[in-house]
Image (spheres, coloured by chain):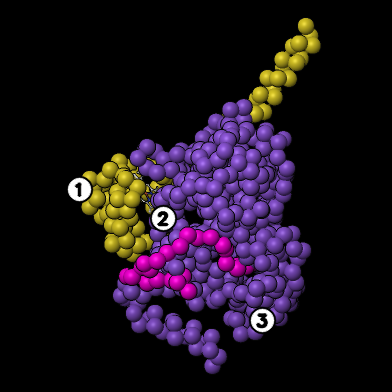
Chain colours: A yellow, B purple
Amino acid sequence: MKLLVIILLMIVSLEAAAIKDVKMTSMTFVIPTEKDTIVIQRNCQWCHSYGYILNQGKQSKEFWHKVVLKMRNTYKAPISARDEVLATEYLYRHFGN
Amino acid sequence: MQRREFFRVSLIASTALVSNSATASSVIKPRDNQQVSDISFIEKRPLITHSDRPPLLETPRDAFVNAITPNNELFVRWHMPRIKTHIDLNSYHIYVHGEVKERLYLSVDSLKNDFEAVSVTVAMQCGGNSRSAFVPTTSGIQWGSGAMGCSVYKGVRLKDVLARAGLTENSHYITFNGSDEAVMKKIESFKRELKIDELSDETIIAYEQNGEDLPFLNGYPIRLIIPGFYADSWVKALVNINVTKEYIPYYYMDTAYRVPDNERESETPLKHAKNTKPLELMNIKSFIGYPTSKSKIYAKSNLRVKGIAFDAGSGIKEVLISLDGGKRWESATLGKELSKYAFREFSYGVKMMQKGRVSIMAKAINNRGESQPFAEEIAWNHGGYKYNGIDSVTIDIV
């Protein structure tokens, strides 16, 4: 009986060694708060963190417009025509060169 | 004036002249001295964190003094935001199927027990490493130069796995993908494709990195390792090997990760090259790990410059150091060659007699006689790939 318990315990721990459960670290990438922050919130955090935006550095308005269009055309982000304009303006306001 | 100097001057002049128009392109030094984050990710020490979802972690400069990058410092790059965080090796398997005689479901245990184990020491580098050097800004993550590393991988030959499944006369291409997924079904997941006759014997499915299980963020439990190639095809958390007769077009093969198919692999911002080719073999590169611009160096003390150099597998022949902006070069001492694909350590001893500011440059030469261009000689491409300009570190001698 004792032996059986030990063997059972061994099997359980072997099984456990074969399972890896990971808690992904999350980090907050802060973007400036203003009236249109919500446009970025509703369009730009489905697929990746705001880190992607911050990483680009200061850029032209045309650059940011192209980014927004790429998200819609290439990566299928459902961005409305109105939000396309607002998001571009927000991005240029805070990350413009 | 030497030809090269003339070239540099004229290039700078021409960029200055047209810098207001969108046709101008140039190359600057990649981002350097980026802060590591306060937070560390699983099995990693704090690294430069570009994103947490998906995780994009870059190794800081001071790690590049050793040929082997410790597991907790190796860079991390995923494409898809949904990474499987519960991995059960009792059910995990790679599915080998398509144009093969027999489909296989291979567990990690069967890879370890039923195939010959092989080890390779290889440099791994993201195709967009140092992308932040390209002006105007090219698409993608603006990496500094730390999206690279070198590890000892243990695993099984991809060829052995394919032989077990049995190839047919219709087996021409292989699609690989990992278990990571996009947020929506209509977004294509990260798939890569290789031509079977281009596979080297050294291409392996690895389950160990530097003697330990693969770190979770580097593709646990198994990933593909393709020595000499940029890491875009080194699929992490590999679950699917689909052998096909015809080439299948995928976004990450046909649109992303391509360079102009011309001699200089270059194009202009207004006129992108029509013909392109996939990123494959890495070009030669070297990088200084010590000193960094934060190091405090005293005049008349002995300074030992240290760094690493690598290429796609011809092997490093020489690393040269310049302290005068690239006019005169002297040989550094090379460390042991761990493998022709590995980082090769170099070091160079010098005593700086004067106080003041000095730039240290490093340039590698490989066994094929190829060398690195000056940063400003690098030609622009819109993906910001394959930067390999001569590295320089500017220090204050106090």
Q: Dot 1: few (<14), some (14–19), or many (≥20) neighbours within 10 Å?
A: few
Location of residue B262 by image quarter: bottom left
Residue drawn at x 74%, y 11% as measured from the top left = A5
Q: Is residue B21 visible?
A: yes
List x then y, in percent, for residue B288.
64, 67
Report the quarter where the C terminus of chain B lies: bottom right
Chain letter of the residue beneath label 3 in the structure image = B
Main SS, magenta region, reads: loop
Q: Is residue B264 above or below residue B277?
A: below
List x then y, in percent, for residue B36.
55, 53
List x then y, in percent, for residue B172.
52, 50
- Residue with the mark numbered 3: B329
Is B394 positioned to the left or the right of A85 in the image?
right
Give the magenta part as a residue range: B262-288
On whether disc 3 and disc 2 are found on a single subunit, the reply is: yes
On whether disc 2 and disc 1 are found on a single subunit, the reply is: no
Chain letter of the residue beneath label 1 in the structure image = A
Q: Amino acid at mark 2?
A: Asp
User: For this rendering, which residue is in front, B85 or B398?
Assistant: B85
